[in-house]
Structures are given as structure tokens and as C-alpha cells.
Amino acid sequence: MAKKSMIEREKKRERLVAKYAAKRAELKEIANDESKSMEERFKARLTLAKLPRNSSATRLHNRCQLTGRPHAYYRKLKVSRIALRDLGSNGQIPGMVKSSW
């Protein structure tokens, strides 16, 4: 089980990304638009830099929904490999059986 503080930090980042997503997209569009003046593009980049760092989507990290584990994460199921093995062993995932030979 991951530390509560790490899970809460990730939730906070998710909220910030959702809050600033539209504003960041608008500023990036202005900053990358070649038809705009250099001063206007530079001003957009400065405004973008003043936004909170955690509002950037690249700072998000996938975590297991059950344990909060950040590594060995299966995107399709949103769980870690360890949680997936436990669920499969308990028969809670349809069609999945633990192999043994």
C-alpha cells in the first residue's frame, strides 16, 4: 500500500490539471502560432510559466486504484500487477485464471 500522502498528492495534481487544462491549451496555442507577433507569443509563454507546475499533465503518474502503487501499472485495468494477480487468484476477473505447471 502506498503512503496516503503520495496518493493525495496525485489527486491534487489531477484536480489542478483539470482546472487549468483549458487555460494551458489556449496559451500554448498562442505561443506556438507563427502568425502572432513575437511579443504576444513571448507574453503567452511567460503567463504559461506562471501557472502552477503541477497543473501540467506530464506531471501526472498512473497509480493502482486499489493499492496506490505507481509501478507495474496496467492501463486497461487501472491496477498494478500485484493487485491483478490477487484479483485473478480470487476469481474476481472474468476469464482470468492463475496458471500453474
Image: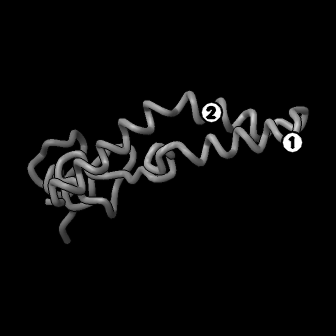
Q: Say the numbered circle drawn on residue 25.
A: 2
Farthest-out residue, bottom? 101
Q: Is residue 56 left or right of residue 44?
A: left
State which quadrant residue 72 falls in: bottom left
Q: Picture coordinates of residue 14 (x, y %)?
A: 37, 40
Q: Is residue 50 left or right of residue 10?
A: right
> Marks 2 and 1: in contact by CB < 8 Å?
no
SS label for mark 2: helix
Mark in the foreground, 1 or 2: 1
Q: Picture coordinates of residue 2 (x, y %)?
A: 18, 60
The CA distance from mark 1 to mark 2 is: 19 Å
State which quadrant residue 25 falls in: top right
Q: Picture coordinates of residue 73 (x, y %)?
A: 34, 56
User: Crowding at label 2, few (<14), some or many (≥20) Cα neighbours within 10 Å?
Assistant: few
Q: Earlier along the polypeptide chain: callout 1 or callout 2?
A: 2
SS label for mark 1: helix
Residue 70 to residue 60: above or below: below
Q: Residue drawn at (42%, 50%), measured in percent from left and top?
A: 60
Q: Say the numbered circle drawn on residue 64.
A: none
Q: Residue drawn at (80%, 36%), measured in percent from left and top?
A: 40
Residue sitting nearer the eye, 84 or 48: 48
Residue sitting nearer the eye, 91 or 73: 73
Residue 86 to residue 18: above or below: below
User: Crowding at label 1, few (<14), some or many (≥20) Cα neighbours within 10 Å?
Assistant: few
Q: Is residue 61 left or right of residue 44?
A: left
Residue indicated by mark 1: 38
What is the quadrant of the C terminus in the image? bottom left
Q: Residue drawn at (59%, 36%), measured in percent from left and top?
A: 24
- The type of residue carrying mark 2 is Ala
